[in-house]
Image (cartoon, rainbow, N blue to C red):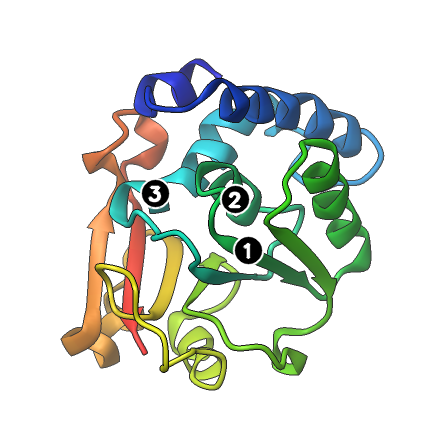
Amino acid sequence: MELIRKYFPELTDIQLSQFEQTGALYTDWNSKINVISRKDIDNLYGHHVLHSLAIAKVIRFSPGTNIVDIGTGGGFPGIPLAIMFPECRFTLIDSIGKKVRVAQDVALRTGLKNVVCRHERAEDEKERFEFILSRGVMPLPDLCSLAGRLIDRKVQRNAYPNGVICLKGGDLNAETARFRKVTETISIDKFFSEEYYKDKKVVYVQI
């Protein structure tokens, strides 16, 4: 939690309480279901919550923005961002039912009113969204191909045009090559000084 306070000093007491609660909830769930690698659960805030919040350093979603997190697993990056942006709507989808149940329970027990969780494949989603989020779920070209039919092109309310925002690591040249004209790759170590973030990126693609 110290890292969350360090990098986001503007958080309200309610938001800090919600972030505090996620620690206990994910630790409890992880003892039953392998939501996060068991050897990494002690790094929940440093490697998962803070990683998710790197997106908030790149874009401040405007109130009313409709966002989907594809392949959310237990709720990353969707849950931390829903806490950060309570006036936005987040839909969290995953094809693995037990992980969706974790995300749903965490959202419910932290009092998040702006989160909907769905057990489904992204290919079956019918709604349209302003932004599609993902945390290393699939190669960028595959994600953008999928995103093409999910992006809402009628509404534009943010500094970035509607599109895909994903969290990636390592050398991304091969993945981003075909999107060069509409892609921005931001190194997370610009925001967070921890060694873990040295090769991690936020990638934005306008769709």
Query: Which of disc 3 and disc 2 is earlier in sequence?
Result: 3
Q: Nearer the viewer, mark 3 or mark 1?
A: 1
Q: Which residue is mark 2?
A: 82
Give above or below for 38 relative to 59: above
Q: Secondary structure at mark 3?
A: helix
Pinpoint residue 81: horizontal percent, then vertical percent. 47, 43
Rendered residue at 44%/22% (across/down): 12
| Real-space Cα separation, disc 2 to disc 1, in angstroms | 6 Å
Residue 90, label in figure:
1
Residue 130 vs residue 6, the one in the foreground = 130
Give the crowd class for mark 3: few <14, some 14-19, many >=20 residues within 10 Å. some
Residue 80 vs residue 177, the one in the foreground = 80
Q: Secondary structure at mark 1?
A: strand
Q: Which residue is mark 3?
A: 56
Left or right, 33 with respect to 7, comes to right
Say what amino acid the circle numbered 3 marks. Ala
Pinpoint residue 156: horizontal percent, then vertical percent. 30, 71
